[in-house]
Amino acid sequence: MMVGTKKVGKYELGRTIGEGTFAKVKYARNMETGESVAVKILAKSTILKHRMVDQIKREISIMKIVRHPNIVRLHEVLASRTKIYIILEFVSGGELFDKIVHQQKLPENECRGYFQQLIDAVAHCHSKGVYHRDLKPENLLLDSYGNLKVSDFGLSALARQGVGLLQTTCGTPNYVAPEVLGNQGYDGAAADVWSCGVVLFVIMAGYLPFNDTDLPTLYKKINAAEYSCPIWFSPGARSLIQKILDPNPQTRIQIDGIRKDTWFCKHYVPVRHKEEQEVNLDDVCAVFDDIEDKYVAEQSENNEGGPLIMNAFEMITLSQGLNLSALFDRQQDFIKRQTRFVSQKPAKVIISSIEAVAESMGLKVHTRNYKTRLEGTSAIRAGQFAVVLEVYEVAPSFFMVDVRKATGDTLEYHKFYKNFCLKLDNIIWKPTGRLANPNLLRTMTC
């Protein structure tokens, strides 16, 4: 059993693997089957305060409806007196964005494979009347086999009978279609196709087709489809991107057209999946409508005296998610994409060093129980930038510091992390002698 964890029904919760404004995501294990899952945790008070009940209920319903090999699967929904727990498939390979950040641009054949999987997933969503509306590399995850998984349906719209065009302006500006920015009704399918085109450009080029710190200028570029492809794009890729990034949604290529495109069809094997029987939303309704009688048992095991202890079982189970794989001599590509380091300094020294460096960088610091949140202002776009660091004891006098973005731009976060590690160089452990192989070093440090 993992020390310092909480049990929720048949699930044992472990480390936090992500967090946002309204939710936290933790790794968990099904104690009956041993299966790894991710648990999205939402506080009921927050949902009620921000009047998000309908939105969250919609997100959960959508994820139950759109079951596909390239979409993160929702297993079930549970609730305690104070929280809602969304049990999701655990996807261990990280964000596609992480791969772009570290490799700058990906080989064209690899990009085509990811794009084919993305189009398959989006086509399935549209066949169910679901439009994602926030497709971007940060919302595209990779499993341990390198397969793409679409996540985060928080901005999804579910088409209602008799309602044609969507009205809400949402999504990340750089990936949003011109008609969405125009504050007029728009076709959700065409808008998703545009975002897919921007994703394809980004993974092939290593940078955005439309980018400007000044929002009005950015919108002008998007409206005019003002971009240029780098010289390494093949003619076939250029041609398809041009058809997708058509500012007129009426003439923009549709998914059927993309699937017939010569460049797209190369090595294309449509994913085969068994169509699910009628999806039952009773558990979703129970969580939100009859919650008085549907509580799941919660059992906390506090470890207030020191940092969380991660035992061998959790390390092995999470070897892909934690990317500690090199410790077990498993040489995989994703070990390059780390935001965690190891230190042999005492836990209190680690925390005080983190606090001192953060304050020298002009960041606000909040520390509680060996978990530190750093907050500042984003340099890339208006708004907050926040990072969370958590200290785990993985062996006696051997600590792992897990660092993750809470809010802000992913590219900005990676730049911050590299700079932050340089300033923390005196506490970061660097293996010497026989242990100092480059893959292990990359896993443990920056």
Image (cartoon, rainbow, N blue to C red):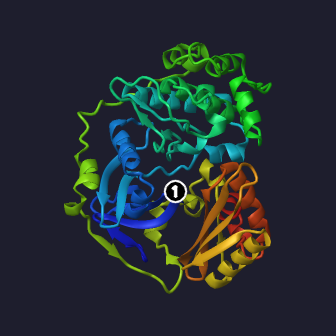
**How busy is the neighbourhood of tag 1: few (under 14 within 10 Å), some, or many (20 plus)?**
many
Q: Quadrant of the N terminus?
A: bottom left
Give the residue furthest to the left.
Answer: 293
* Residue that numbered label 1 is attached to: 321
The number of numbered discs placed on residues in the rendered structure image is 1
Give the residue furthest to the bottom.
Answer: 305
Left/right placement of residue 20 relative to residue 236 reads left
Residue sitting nearer the eye, 409 or 400: 409
Mark 1 secondary-structure assignment: helix
The answer to whether residue 55 is above or below residue 45 is above
Image point 39% across, 55% down: which residue?
37
Left/right placement of residue 444 relative to residue 53 reads right
Q: Position of residue 182 (x, y in %)?
A: 61, 28
Report if residue 247 is visible in the image.
Answer: yes
The answer to whether residue 415 is above or below residue 192 is below
Image point 74% across, 77% down: which residue?
356
Residue sitting nearer the eye, 281 or 182: 182
Report if residue 271 is visible in the image.
Answer: no
The kind of residue tagged 1 is: Gly
Q: Position of residue 370 (x, y in %)?
A: 57, 78
Q: Quadrant of the C terminus?
A: bottom right
The image quadrant of residue 278 is top left
Q: Position of residue 309 (x, y in %)?
A: 49, 77
Q: Position of residue 315 (x, y in %)?
A: 49, 66
